[in-house]
Image (cartoon, rainbow, N blue to C red):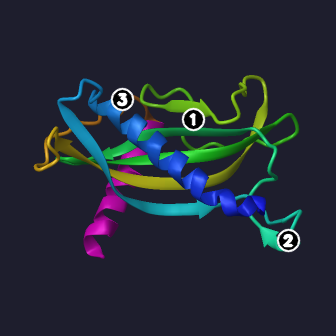
Amino acid sequence: MRWVHNIHLWLEDMDTFAADVAALHADYHDGTKGLVTAFMDELCWVKHDVMDPVGGQQSKLPPPRVDMQLSGQVTWVGKSSMEVTLELHECGPSSSSSSDLGGSASGTTTSTTSGGTSEGQNSTLVALSRFVMAARTSDFKKSCAVDALVASSPSEEALFNLGALHQQDRLDR
């Protein structure tokens, strides 16, 4: 099997990670409320084109044995839904760093998918994605309120404003 066919595993990991980030924001780990993925709003591969080592076709995906880091944060909150923005980075000692989410935000969560740590390593942004998560009651029959998002820095305020624009775009569709 070609390594590019494993993209569904990345999407599954991103979806699960977005739910974890949303649950941390909403404090839903007690089982009284639930979260569902309403939809993936966007997935943008931003890494430069590379050649698939097996098929010889161009791909934006990283090589198969590279450490990957997934980070994300809640970037917009409505009455019963929230937008979670994720970044997928390829970690390595010679990569260049370019993260929009930053690591200092209190709502930022990070996971390294290879089991190792990326401390002290540079990273290259591979993909950006946005998920909309909906808050539900424990029986998943009704929507429930989500805690407000409080921006504590200018960069978090900018991300929130961008999330509000994304929400307006979703309403206009």
Number of residues whose C-alpha sits closer than 10 Å to that of mark 2, classed few (under 14), some (14–19) or many (20 or more): few
- Please give the residue where the numbered disc 3 appears in the rendered image: 24
The amino acid type found where label 1 is placed reads Gly
Percent across and percent down for residue 162 are 40, 53
Mark 3 and mark 1 residues within 8 Å of each other at the beta carbon: no
Q: What stretch is highlighted in magenta?
A: 155-173
The CA span between labels 3 and 1 is 18 Å
**Picture residue at 58% right of the left edge, 62% below the top:** 44
- Whether residue 38 is situated above or below residue 72 in the rendered picture: below
Q: In which image quadrant can residue 169 be found?
A: bottom left
N-terminal of the pair, mark 2 or mark 3, is 3
The C terminus sits in image quarter: bottom left
Is there CB contact under 8 Å for labels 1 and 2?
A: no
Q: Which residue is drawn at 20% across and 39% down?
A: 146
Does the rendering let one see residue 158? no
Spatial CA span between label 1 and label 2: 35 Å
* Labels 3, 1: front one: 3
Rendered-image quadrant of the N terminus: bottom right
Please name the predominant secondary structure of the magenta segment in the image: helix
Give the camera-side residue of 128 and 163: 128
Tell me where residue 2 appears, x and y as whole percent: 78, 63
Q: Position of residue 101 (x, y in %)?
A: 54, 40
- Please, what is the three-letter code of the amino acid marked with disc 2? Gly
Badge 1 or badge 2: first in the primary sequence:
2
- Residue 170 magenta-highlighted: yes
The residue under label 3 is which amino acid type?
Leu
Instruction: Give above or below for 145 relative to 118.
Output: below
Element under label 1? loop
Q: What residue does disc 2 label?
A: 55
